[in-house]
Image (cartoon, grey):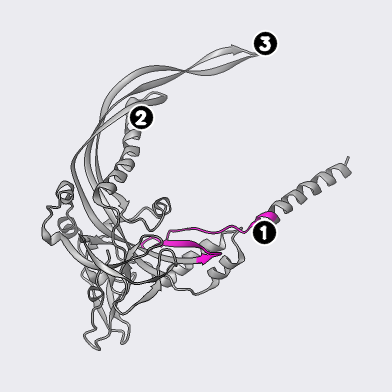
Amino acid sequence: MATTETEHRFPCVQCGASLRFVPGLQTLACEYCGHEQEMPKLDDATRIKTLQSLDYHEAVAKTLPETEIEETRVMNCQTCGAQVEFEADTHSTECPFCATPVVSDTGTNRHIKPQAVIPFALSERDAHEKMRAWLRGRWFAPDGLKKYARSDGRLNGLYVPYWAFDADTRSSYTGERGTHYYVTVRGPKGKTRQERRTRWRRTSGSVARKFHDVLVMAARSLPRPMVRRLEPWTLSELELYSPKYLSGFRAEAYTVDLPEGFDIAKQRMDEVIRNDIRRDIGGDDQRIHSVSTAYADERFKHLLLPIWMAAYRYRDKSYRFIVNGQTGRVQGERPWSAWKIAGAVAAVLLLIALIAFVAELGQ
């Protein structure tokens, strides 16, 4: 969540310099004198009691308690639409999501404040190694990309906003159950073979499922399919939100509101519900004709999840790499080298011609 700069800076009790959260350790460390300060860690019982979800319908009706709301100042990137906080004395910089030069123009943003955060487990150096390994495996990438992989360009540590939805569902369905059977079929030359066929029978029924913590990225700055491939996240490592976890990092404001986020969550729920229906129909094959789902006890949490990210421009186009700051899983966008692809195709054609030539000599 985008936060004011004063929320991000915590003075060292020994020298007054800024403390910074240390990935992989539950500590804040002074960037000047090295003094360390332990962060409180929730035990399992306290985590379950404290990290309670909020009522979805109260939030949509804007009747949540004021204790769940905060105001911050954020910068809007005009190119990709990201809302990210910047230092108060920064007047021009580069958007961490699309590498576009921007001039900071902050405005007030009133929003539901985060309830929990997964702290960074990977350091920037660890994330660099993960990114380099990923880039080394891109065979048809331009040489400029491989050079970027060998460079020590800075990665941005970012907290990305997520909604985590809960819901009780009951789904009524109609469909067909298919049972396979085999018949003997005679071919044109008199040979016989077994051919599988399916006998279909109409069916209907209902299934119920309780969903818990269905994750939806609450921002538009990164492609949703790419971010989904960073999953899974281990939500058992969530900690109660504290601005101290954000010290030394940036955080993005959510730009996907709750109703839109819940619609996306329903799509993910529907994938699971349809699998439940197929199991309920049974048989060898299934057809689903209609599904009607009722939702109850809809609740949500606002979470911040950590990613390391690099954005660079290649031939006037933006490309991004993202690393799961908890697990190290990497996803990225990359340009393709037409010369390398053409060279590989030519090499394959040459190899085929050589094999054909050798085969002809051997006859």
Q: Disc 1 to disc 3, how far (Cα)?
A: 55 Å
Q: Amino acid at mark 2?
A: Arg
Residue 266 is labelled as none
Q: Position of residue 247 (x, y in %)?
A: 28, 73
Label 1 residue SS? helix
Q: Amino acid at mark 1?
A: Trp
Label 2 residue SS? helix
Q: Disc 2 to disc 3, how far (Cα)?
A: 39 Å
Label 3 residue SS? loop
Residue 253: quadrant of the picture: bottom left
Residue 190 is labelled as 3
Sooner in the amino-acid sequence: mark 2 or mark 3: 3
Q: Residue at x 62, y 59 (%)?
A: 337
Numbered range of the magenta stretch: 313-342
Q: Disc 2 to disc 1, how far (Cα)?
A: 48 Å
Screen quadrant of the C terminus? top right
Q: Which residue is mark 1?
A: 339
Nearest to viewer (mark 2 / mark 3): 2
Q: Is residue 34 above or below residue 341?
A: below
Q: Residue at x 27, y 63 (%)?
A: 1
Q: Amino acid at mark 3?
A: Gly
Q: Position of residue 196 (x, y in %)?
A: 52, 19
Whether label 1 touches label 3, CB < 8 Å: no
Q: Is residue 188 above or below residue 66?
A: above
Q: Position of residue 46 (x, y in %)?
A: 16, 60
Q: Is residue 220 above or below residue 2?
A: above
Q: Which residue is mark 2?
A: 278
Q: Position of residue 314 (x, y in %)?
A: 54, 65
Sooner in the amino-acid sequence: mark 2 or mark 1: 2
Give the number of callouts.
3
